[in-house]
Image (cartoon, helix red, strand yellow):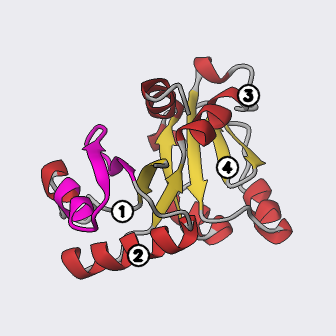
């Protein structure tokens, strides 16, 4: 059965707190197997017989909205895709700074890439590869001029994880 990692957007924001055991139970109620959470930031690993990734994302989003009372976008990736994201990160000096991976529902359009490029500063640099946008931030996040709202306006719905988290997840399932 295929294994997926689900990255959820905006689960624990605005004073809302979803405990990981509650989130795991929501995924288990969808008849997904081998459900586990990875750190308390909306990462769920599971296996499933389902083969249509977009339909599965939509099913999970609909279920979460019914359970939580608000929308949380879901971005699925396989372990092999996570390894490719780690291996393909485009910044040679990334370990000296903060590198985030933004998971998107689809590869961004030319207009979205242009809007993202317009957000670059001497401290903030972006690269897009497939359905991911990489954000290299050379200052502390409280010092950057790039905000989540500006990113959402440029790219549409996404969720970001630090490259360290993505590396740990990729290492957890190296067989892909």
Q: Which residue is mark 3?
A: 91
- For the point 74% across and 48% down, the residue is 120
Q: Which residue is mark 2?
A: 59
Residue 64, above or below 78: below
Q: Earlier in the sequence, mark 2 or mark 4?
A: 2
Circles 2 and 3, Cβ within 8 Å, touching? The answer is no
Query: What whole-number distance in Å separates the C-alpha atoms at marks 2 and 3?
Result: 35 Å
SS label for mark 2 = helix
Q: Earlier in the sequence, mark 2 or mark 1?
A: 1
Residue 147 place in picture, x, y as percent: 53, 56
Say few, some or many: other residues with alpha carbon within 10 Å of mark 4 (under 14 / 14 to 19 / 20 or more): many
Res. 33 in view = yes
Q: Which residue is mark 1?
A: 10
SS label for mark 4 = strand
- For the point 44% across and 68% down, the residue is 73
Residue 67, above or below 136: below
Q: Which residues, given as a range, are shown in magenta?
A: 24-47
Quadrant in which the C terminus is drawn: top right
Q: Which residue is mark 4?
A: 133
Circles 3 and 1, Cβ within 8 Å, touching? The answer is no
Along the horizontal axis of the image, is 115 left or right of 39? Answer: right
Residue 86 place in picture, x, y as percent: 62, 30
Q: Is residue 157 magenta?
A: no
Along the horizontal axis of the image, is 41 left or right of 151? Answer: left
Q: Earlier in the sequence, mark 3 or mark 1?
A: 1
Query: What whole-number distance in Å separates the C-alpha atoms at marks 2 and 1?
Result: 17 Å
SS label for mark 1 = loop
Residue 136, above or below 3: above
Q: Nearer the viewer, mark 2 or mark 3?
A: 2
């Amino acid at each position: 059965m295929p294994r997926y990692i689900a990255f959820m957007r905006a689960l624990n924001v605005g004073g809302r707190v979803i405990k990981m055991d509650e989130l795991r139970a929501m995924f288990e109620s969808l008849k997904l197997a081998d459900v586990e959470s990875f750190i308390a930031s909306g990462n769920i690993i599971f296996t499933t017989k389902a083969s249509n990734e977009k339909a599965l994302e939509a099913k999970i989003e609909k279920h979460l909205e019914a359970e939580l009372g608000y929308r949380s976008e879901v971005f699925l990736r396989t372990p092999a895709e996570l390894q490719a994201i780690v291996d393909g990160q485009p910044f040679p000096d990334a370990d000296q700074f903060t590198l985030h991976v933004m998971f998107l529902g689809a590869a961004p359009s030319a207009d979205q890439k242009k809007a993202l490029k317009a957000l670059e500063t001497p401290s903030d640099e972006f690269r897009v590869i497939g359905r991911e946008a990489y954000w290299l931030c050379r200052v502390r996040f409280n010092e950057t001029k790039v905000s989540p709202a500006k990113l959402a306006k440029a790219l549409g719905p996404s969720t970001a994880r630090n490259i360290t988290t993505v590396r740990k997840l990729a290492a957890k399932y190296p067989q892909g």
